[in-house]
Amino acid sequence: MQLLKRVIHDAITHQQITPEHPQCFTRIATRAIVIRAQKILLMYTQRYNDYSLPGGGVDQGESLEEGLKRELSEETGAYDINNIKAFGLYEEFRPYRHDKYYTHCNVMHMLSYCYTCDIAEQLAAMKLEDYEIKNGMRVSWVDIDEAINHNLQTMSHDPKQGLSIERETYLLKQIKNKLFN
């Protein structure tokens, strides 16, 4: 898959930037790009006031395509997911706050594999996780320029908004340039 961008966030030292480093772990995720009638299917998160591509972590033993279908279905209610094609990879090394699984790690090597796909005309019920519900996530068909401008506005009002909005805004710009004419 084509590498779209590699990001090493400022807080990461050069000794920590290899996936093999003992304080680094790799997280693999997929992101879905679904376009219909000049709109893109996105997740809006009220807590962060941002738009993002539907998707998330690939489970152990799952293929990238299986993870894409599962995450897209859970987050948006999409079904009959087909015509899946590679779009690009966004790679980042970012600071990581410890949790019960990776107590020895302080760097996450995040690989976001992005795919275009088609879905059925209607959406079924979403199956959001508790934290997604608490964060106020909802699915929405959005004009891509509106989503990009919204995220840029959010980042300008709160420069410490987080690392994910930078990734998502970059990806939305790439999608606009390559898939919207």
Image (cartoon, rainbow, N blue to C red):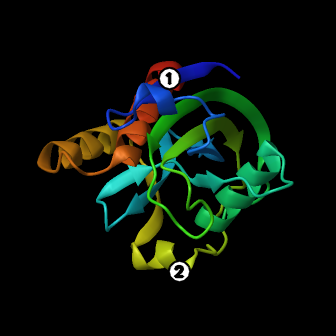
User: Which mark is on residue 140?
Assistant: none
The CA distance from mark 1 to mark 2 is: 31 Å
Residue 19: image x %, image y %? 63, 34
Q: Residues within 10 Å of mark 1 (few under 14, many from 20)?
A: few
Judged left or right of residue 136, residue 64 is: right
Residue marked by disc 1: 5
Residue at point 51%, 29% (across, down): 17
Return the residue nearer the eye: 14 or 84: 14
For the residue labelled by badge 1, is the local secondary structure a helix, a strand or a loop? strand
Q: Quadrant of residue 94?
A: top left
Task: Identify whether 117 is placed above or below 48.
Answer: above
Residue at point 46%, 52% (across, down): 96
The type of residue carrying mark 2 is: Asp
The quadrant the N terminus occupies is top right
Q: Quadrant of residue 121?
A: bottom right
Residue marked by disc 2: 130
The type of residue carrying mark 1 is: Lys
Mark yes or no: residue 151 visible. Answer: yes
Return the residue nearer the eye: 25 or 141: 25
